[in-house]
Image (spheres, rainbow, N blue to C red):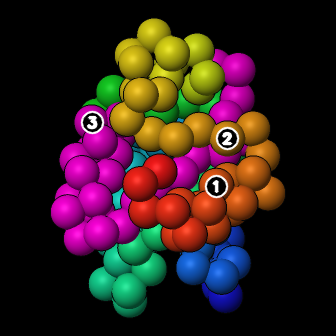
Amino acid sequence: MSSNEFFQVESHGEATVVTVQLPRISESEGIDQFFATLNALVKKGHTRLVLDLHQVELVSSRALGKLVVFQRNLAKMGGWIRLCRLSNYLQELFRITQLGKLFQVFPDREQAIAGAASAEADPAK
């Protein structure tokens, strides 16, 4: 689909996979670019997103808050976000903050895409 130095965007059926190539999503590094990219995708009709975060080492609390708001707004539009390949640090952060209850987290891209496909087949999921 497209890519730049910060993101690689690919279409996989109904899901759009965004591989984040930033080590940090914070005020000083990447937060504006990250959300500008997500908002641009939504404006183009991509409302079912899989975020591959395997290269991300740090996410600021502000970025997490914006991600929660973004996810809620996307859900109101009938869309969703699935997360995959979180570093050990991000897995622990999502566990401690209980954000794992808000976001579906998968160990790899294939399972996230398959989870997205099964949610398409069964909207109750």
User: Where does label 1 land, which residue?
Assistant: 115
Q: Give amino acid for label 2.
A: Phe
Instruction: Tell me which residue sits at (38%, 86%) in the image.
Output: 45
State the residue in front, 1 or 6. Answer: 1
Decide which of tag 3 and tag 2 comes sooner along the chain.
Answer: 3
**Residue 20 visible in rendering:** no
Q: Can you tell which quarter of the image residue 113 is in?
A: bottom right
Residue 86 lies in the magenta stretch: yes
Instruction: Tell me which residue sits at (47%, 28%) in the image.
Output: 100
Q: Give amino acid for label 1.
A: Gly
Decide which of tag 2 and tag 1 comes sooner along the chain.
Answer: 2
Crowding around mark 2 (Cα neighbors within 10 Å: few <14, some 14 to 19, many 20+) is: some
Question: What is the x, y in percent for residue 98?
Answer: 40, 18
Q: What label sits on residue 65 in the rendered view?
A: 3
Instruction: Tell me which residue sits at (70%, 20%) in the image.
Output: 88
**Residue 120 visible in rendering:** yes
Mark whose residue sits in front, 2 or 1 = 1
User: Where does label 2 land, which residue?
Assistant: 106
Mark whose residue sits in front, 3 or 2 = 2
Position of the N terminus, as image quadrant, is bottom right
Distance in Å between CA atoms under marks 2 and 1: 8 Å
Quick one: SS at disc 2? strand
The magenta region covers 63-89
Instruction: Tell me which residue sits at (47%, 51%) in the image.
Output: 125
Q: Is residue 87 above or below residue 54?
A: above
Q: Is residue 110 above or below residue 44?
A: above
Crowding around mark 3 (Cα neighbors within 10 Å: few <14, some 14 to 19, many 20+) is: few
Q: Is residue 13 above or below residue 17?
A: below
The residue most toward the top is: 96
Quick one: SS at disc 1? helix
State the residue in front, 61 or 14. Answer: 14
